[in-house]
Image: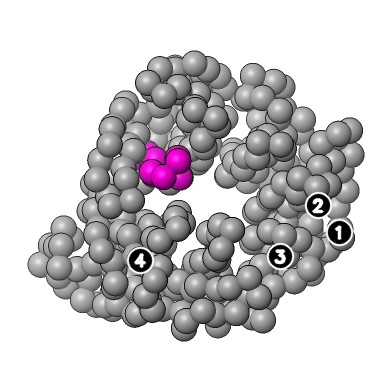
């Protein structure tokens, strides 16, 4: 099965798959990779990230030209529909016009700074806004708490150049990763337990976490880093190209990944790793299936 649009990322859980397109498309798929309902474009701007819960999908839409950033929740139990065009957004009376919102959304929040690191923590959501703070909200968009924006005082670049790339739940802690290698662990009371800086060759693009596989760090260049604990030194692997997604397969004890014209895997028992050439670009991997940048679901190349 292939998609009718160009995909950029995937949100999934044990029951469903949400594919996000490069132009703001959204599609609900079953585990046979078939459309549950026709894909839609609820809002005329780019979707930067999303999180999936049992009954709702929550996403962030951004238009930098119009300085428009908003978060909204769309229920899963309805058919998603197309929303307004960009011309209406451009000519609306104000960017904060609450009558302008993603189609079918039950709530939205107009954001005054670009959000980063959107993540599920339990049944809630955590995200940061650039140089403003870090926030937890519930699935209805209601604020639970807010705290100071993470700062690494020994960082050699400004916070403007060091966005938050991932916020991940690890047991009862929240672990925050920045592009320049800053890592901060907060406990349930948001007390800093660990704060350190990894000196890596390239900036971090994304981080994945598994209870069994632990930490998988993707970078903008041709390398990845794998750690058992954030206080360990990373195991660095030079890759044939940038890595765009990864998942841990518990039965085999391996991290598998996909990216620019290659797939790869590393066995955590002995750090053995291998690559295999891919003719296209993999943007998502799960259950040994790859979603490519041209919208096809393919088998993992190294299997």
Q: State the residue position of label 2.
A: 264
| Residue at x 57% of width, y 44% of height | 205
* Chain-order first, disc 3 or disc 2: 2
x, y percent for residue 262:
79, 58
Position of 210 with respect to 133 (left or right) is right
Depth check, mark 4 against mark 3: the one in front is 4
Q: Position of residue 95 (x, y in %)?
A: 18, 60
- Residue 233 percent coordinates (x, y): 72, 22
- Residue occupied by mark 3: 290
Which badge, 4 or 3, is on the more N-terminal residue? 4
Sequence-first disc among 4 and 2: 4
Q: Is residue 112 above or below residue 2?
A: above
- Per the image, label 4 sits on a secondary structure element best described as strand
Q: Which residues are magenta?
A: 119-131
For the residues bearing labels 4 and 3, Cβ distance under 8 angstroms = no
The residue that mark 1 highlights is: 302
Name the quarter where the N terminus is drawn: bottom right
- Measured in 3D between alpha carbons, the distance from the residue under mark 3 to the one under mark 1, in whole angstroms, is 11 Å
Q: Is residue 67 visible?
A: no
Question: Are the residues at dot 2 and dot 1 in contact (C-beta closer than 8 Å)?
Answer: yes
Q: Secondary structure at mark 2?
A: strand
């Amino acid at each position: 099965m292939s998609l009718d649009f160009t995909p950029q990322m995937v949100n999934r859980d044990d029951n469903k798959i949400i594919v996000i397109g490069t132009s703001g498309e959204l599609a609900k798929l079953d585990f046979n990779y078939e459309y549950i309902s026709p894909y839609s474009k609820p809002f005329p701007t780019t979707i930067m990230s999303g999180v999936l819960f049992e009954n709702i999908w929550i996403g962030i839409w951004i238009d930098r030209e119009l300085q428009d950033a908003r978060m909204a929740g769309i229920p899963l139990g309805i058919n998603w529909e197309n929303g307004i065009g960009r011309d209406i957004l451009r000519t609306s009376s104000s960017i904060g016009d609450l009558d302008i919102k993603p189609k079918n959304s039950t709530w939205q929040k107009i954001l005054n700074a670009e959000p980063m690191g959107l993540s599920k923590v339990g049944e809630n959501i955590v995200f940061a806004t650039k140089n403003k703070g870090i926030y937890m909200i519930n699935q209805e968009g209601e604020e639970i708490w807010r705290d100071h924006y993470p700062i690494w005082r020994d960082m050699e670049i400004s916070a403007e150049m060091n966005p938050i790339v991932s916020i991940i739940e690890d047991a009862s802690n929240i672990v925050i990763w920045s592009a320049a290698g800053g890592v901060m662990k907060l406990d349930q009371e948001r007390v800093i337990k660990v704060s350190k800086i990894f000196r890596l060759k390239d900036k971090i693009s994304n981080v994945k976490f598994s209870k069994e596989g632990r930490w998988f760090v993707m970078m903008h260049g041709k390398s990845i880093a794998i750690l058992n604990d954030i206080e360990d030194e990373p195991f660095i692997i030079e890759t044939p190209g940038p890595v765009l997604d990864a998942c841990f397969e518990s039965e085999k004890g391996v991290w598998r990944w996909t990216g620019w014209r290659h797939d790869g895997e590393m066995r955590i028992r002995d750090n053995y790793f291998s690559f295999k050439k891919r003719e296209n670009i993999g943007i998502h991997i799960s259950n040994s299936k790859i979603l490519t940048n041209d919208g096809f679901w393919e088998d993992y190349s190294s299997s």
